[in-house]
Each structure stands twice: as C-alpha cells, then as structure tokens.
Amino acid sequence: MEWTREKRYRRLDEASPEEIQQLTHQVEASPWRQTFHIQPHTGLLNDPNGFSYYNGFYHLFYQWFPLGPVHGMKYWYHVKSKDLVNWEDVGIGIEPDRDYDSHGAYSGSAIEHEGKLYLFYTGNTRNENWIRHPYQCLAVMDIEGDIRKQEEAVIRSVPSGYTDHFRDPKIWKDGETFYAVIGAQRENQTGCVVLYSSLNLTDWKFEGELGTNLKNFGYMWECPDYFEADGRGVFIFSPQGIEPSGDEFQNIYQSGYLIGDPLNLPDRTFHHGDFRELDRGFDFYAPQTMASPDGRRILVGWMGLPDIDYPTDQHGWAHCLTLPRELSVKNEKLVQKPVKELELLRKQELAATFVADNEAKSLEGFTGTRFELRCEISDFSAEEFGIEFRASGDEKTVIKYDAIQKTAVLDRSVSGAQVGVEHGTTRSCSVDADKIVFHLFVDTSSVEIFLNDGEEVFTSRIFPDAGSDQIHFYAKNGNATFNTRKWDLGV
C-alpha cells in the first residue's frame, strides 16, 4: 500500500470491518509476533504513555496507529496489570476526536489526584496548509475506568522563542505544586525542555526553560522525564540530531539521561554531569518512568525507532514495548534491572557450570526461541568469549566480550531478516571488570541484555527463522568459566 497523507490520517472508524478483519488476519499470521511483550493487535505502536499506578493496577498506554505499520493518526491504547507481567487489554484510552487533537493524540503522562487519574498529552493539529500547532490537553479517568476529556486544552499556545515542535508533557508533584516538563525546540533550531507549574492541574503557568549546560545538543528534545532517586536528580530525554562519536550515539535518534543535584525549582537550574545513553542496543527510544507503590522507579521504553523500516511492516504491524526495568543510581550512573516480577514468567529451569577452552560448547536442553538466560563468566584468559543465540547453520545473534579492548559487543549482522543496516550491525560499549554477567531476555523477535546487573543494557529487535533456536557458549584464544541458568518463559 502507498501510504498517502489521506491514508495515514484516517480514523479507525473510517475503515471498513472487512479491512480491519483482513489486517488482523495478516498480523496474526506473522512469524515474528512476540509472546511476553506488549505489542499492537494491528498497525504501529510507539511511545509508552501515561505509565502510572491507580486503583490497584499499573496502567500503561501507548501511541497507536491501528490501520498499518506507519506513523499516522495516533490514539492512546490502554493496557493494565496487577503485576507488570500479565497485561489486560482495556482498549482505546484516548481518541483524536476534538479540534485540539484533530491530527493525533500524541505522547504524555499521568498522575493520580483526588481519587482520579489525570492524563496529559499533546494534541496534534494541522491547518489547511499542513502547518502544525500543538496543544497540551487533559483527560481524566475515574475509578470506573471512564475517561473524559476537558472541553478546552489546558495549554493552548507555544511560548515566545520556541517553534511548534512542542510536546510530550511529563507531570509530577512537589509539595502542593504540580510541575510539567515539555520537550521543545528553540527558534534557532536547537533542542531544550521547558517547565510549567500548576496548583490545580488545569491552570498552568510557564516558568521558563530548564537550565542545563547543553545549549546546542541536537535540534529537538522529545519525551522528557524528571525524577529523584537515591538523593540525586535524574533527567531523561530523547534528543534528536546528535552526531555519532565512537561507540556513542550510533542510532538514528538517542535516548539518555543527566544525573545531578536535585532540580532547583525556583530558578529551574539543574547542575549535572555528562549525558549518557540509556541503552546500548539498536532499538530503544522514548522511555517513560513511574513510581511504583513500593517506591521503585520503573521504566518502560519503545522497542523501536522512528524513520526505520522493520521486517514486520510487510505483516501489517510494527514495534513493541520493552520489559519493565527498575532504576537506581550508582556511582553517578543509572542502573537498570529487570523488575523482579518477571520471575513469574519462568517455567522449566536448567543450570550448568563448565569451562570453554578455545572452543564453542552446546549444552543439552539449552535451546529455544523464548527464554531467560543468566550467564556469569569468570576466571577468563580468553581474548574473547560470549554467547551465540537464536542460532542455526547460517543465523545467529552474538553478545560477546573483547577482553583485549575491554568492550562488550552485540552483533546482529546475521540475525535473520535485516533491519536498519545503514546504521550498522554492531553496538559496543566499554566494560572493565573481572567478571562479566550477561542476562538475556529473548522473545520471538527481540532480545534485551542486562550487562553486569544492569550497568549497561542492549535492547534490540531481531528477526530470525523459527528454526534458529540453538545456543552456543564460546571462548577464543584462551579459556573462561561459564556459570549459567536458563528458564523457558511463558505467560
């Protein structure tokens, strides 16, 4: 199908039942459908939105264009869970049906207040000349799950000095005041974030720009998020327009964070360290965090990127969300660990300890297309060691450690159907440690690798054949001791 503007900006109710049924059958026949990740029934999923806890459930919405694997008329689709593992479909949460969101309900966040869940989002509009104008909008969900929009947008104009690239409000409360950071672009085409405040969630005051030392860092900052953890201020955002540098910034767009002193709200200054990427893999963008009832800071991201074609496009769908991750600050770095609830997915367990000496080893029972694998590698003299998974005669995905360069490398050059090869087929980061831990969550068409208990993470889509289910452990030019456990996973 040629995706003209008219086809991209159709509403769901403009599609015939026959079209929806045909698209659904096409998606269900896809060999790369995930099993324990949130994914769209049809069409395209992107940014996680409104991640929150309310009335006994975790609530998560995501950007959704239902009619095909392209960016078009966006809805908020709603899922909820009691345990961050088993997600229940609720259905469409926000439809683009008002003047202020006529061309899409874009990204935003949620906060509980006075027994209701307040959903903030950017309403996308276009005029007859296709010139955009954003509105910051409010919908309120009650304890019955009914969502009602406010009659008017709560922020109707863009402040002076900024373009109409102005979106993705993230809300939090400090004392009696609500604050929102909004991603923005200055009129000189550089990215930044601005701050608003409110006492009642409906009347918002523009406070000004968030003061960082990144004055010329890309052309747009999307999906901002601010929180405090372990006594430090953490500012997450997704800058666009950052040039690659060594192992850094190799994806088409980046997501990362700044850590510093807690934000000084009266003057909006944020004293911080260097910008660090959140994820070292190929497919990660637009993350959002929330505070769980027990005080954990939990993150979910979009496992995908804009402006890249994916193999599932031909099957009528695209993308999924990452698994939830618990965040903490350690040595001025954000550590990400899979939430403990994911242990609910574990089925049959296997364990083995062995030495690989300049060889590759396969272990009985260590195969699969959907599994969790934790492998501690120590006492190594090998120059290189690692794990090949989703492997067959001519396919494999490899996570390895180069002990000479002290570098971890994810290689998907022969992972199966190719994706984004123009942006490279390997991703790397520096790691200097006496023990290397690779903790993998492998689904039908993805892998999330937590390195050394979350000091680094590699998130990637992979598209192997269903028969590529082998796992090999190897060491080159020396030996290494492997201590590994594997679980089959299922919901």
Image: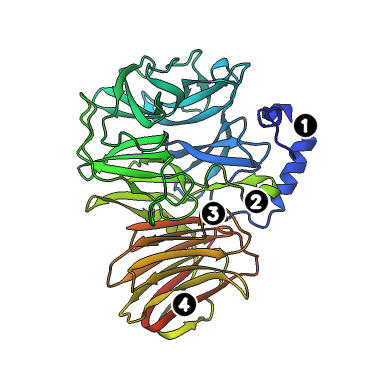
Do tag 4 and tag 3 residues touch (Cβ < 8 Å)? no
Do tag 3 and tag 2 residues touch (Cβ < 8 Å)? no
**Residue on which disc 2 sits:** 312
Q: Vertically, is 411 above or below 367?
A: above
**Amino acid type, mark 4:** Phe
Q: Earlier in the sequence, mark 3 or mark 2?
A: 3
Disc number lying in front (3 or 1)? 1
Q: Tell me residue 318's x, y (percent).
A: 61, 46
Crowd band around label 4 with a 10 angstrom C-alpha radius: few (<14), some (14–19), many (20+) = many
**Residue on which disc 4 sits:** 473
| Tally of numbered discs | 4
Q: Earlier in the sequence, mark 1 or mark 4?
A: 1
Q: Earlier in the sequence, mark 3 or mark 1?
A: 1
- Alpha-carbon span between mark 3 and mark 1: 30 Å
Q: Secondary structure at mark 4?
A: strand
Q: Secondary structure at mark 2?
A: helix
**Residue on which disc 1 sits:** 16
Crowd band around label 3 with a 10 angstrom C-alpha radius: few (<14), some (14–19), many (20+) = many
